Amino acid sequence: MRTALHDFVYLASQSPRRRQLLVQIGVRHELLLPGDGEDAEALEAVRAGEDPQAYAERVTRAKLAAARRRLLARALPAAPILAADTTVAIGRRILGKPADADDARAMLAALAGRTHRVITAVAVWSGTRTLAATSVSRVRFAPLGRARIDAYVAGGEPFGKAGAYAIQSAAAAWISHIEGSHSGIMGLPLYETAELLERARVRF
């Protein structure tokens, strides 16, 4: 006998883009965010010599484990949990969220005129097992002058975003080529996510 379908998932992410993408494919969700006593940023610390894809997958698993503990501690109704992490990489160099404006400018200057990878790992706790997938896309930026980078940073867009940019922002005008998943570059690859949610028996 097959288990019943779940009507919603918990989303362990503060990203409004991930919420938007789940809505796009008709997935009902509730946020399952860290409490005041949790240091969520510590989960994203990079280990020395860590491969970018391994990093994204490890952080995603850590986010999912933290969310499972949260669900139990808060005695919330049972439902699948979805977690994800997006990493921008040039070779083995991981470009995380910029610490300040200078860091953002340096990241964008490094991305200008070259191809980089955007790696988004997704994991779903089905209630009995963890299901996972990873999307790797390649993005090529046109050359960028200092004035364009300065204007983008001054607008505040880079902060809180891996690689200091968002594809749904003005930075889209700099992208000459994409190979991979547009939604994955935004932060949640919908093809892979939908497959995981179907396997977790989520209704959408």
Image (cartoon, rainbow, N blue to C red):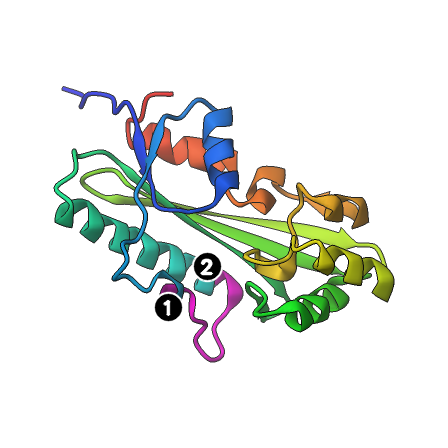
Q: Which mark is residue 201?
A: none
Indicate the secondary structure of the residue bearing disc 2.
Answer: helix
The reply to whether callout 1 and callout 2 are in contact (CB within 8 Å) is no
Q: Position of residue 185 (x, y in %)?
A: 60, 46
Q: Which residue is mark 2?
A: 56
- Amino acid type at circle 1 is Ala
Q: CA distance from mark 1 to mark 2?
A: 14 Å
Q: For residue 55, what is the image quadrant?
A: bottom left
Q: Along the line of sight, which residue is nearer the eye, 127 or 195?
A: 127
Q: Is residue 43 above or below residue 5?
A: below
Q: For residue 76, what is the image quadrant?
A: top left
Q: In this picture, which residue range is highlighted in magenta? A: 42-53
Q: Which mark is residue 42?
A: 1
At 67% across and 45% down in the image, what residue appears? 167
Q: Position of residue 83 (x, y in %)?
A: 37, 47
Q: Is residue 107 above or below residue 17?
A: below
- Characterize the local packing of mark 2: few (<14), some (14-19) or many (20 or more) Cα atoms within 10 angstroms: many
Q: Is residue 144 in view from this perspective?
A: no
Q: Is residue 87 magenta?
A: no
Indicate the secondary structure of the residue bearing disc 1.
Answer: helix
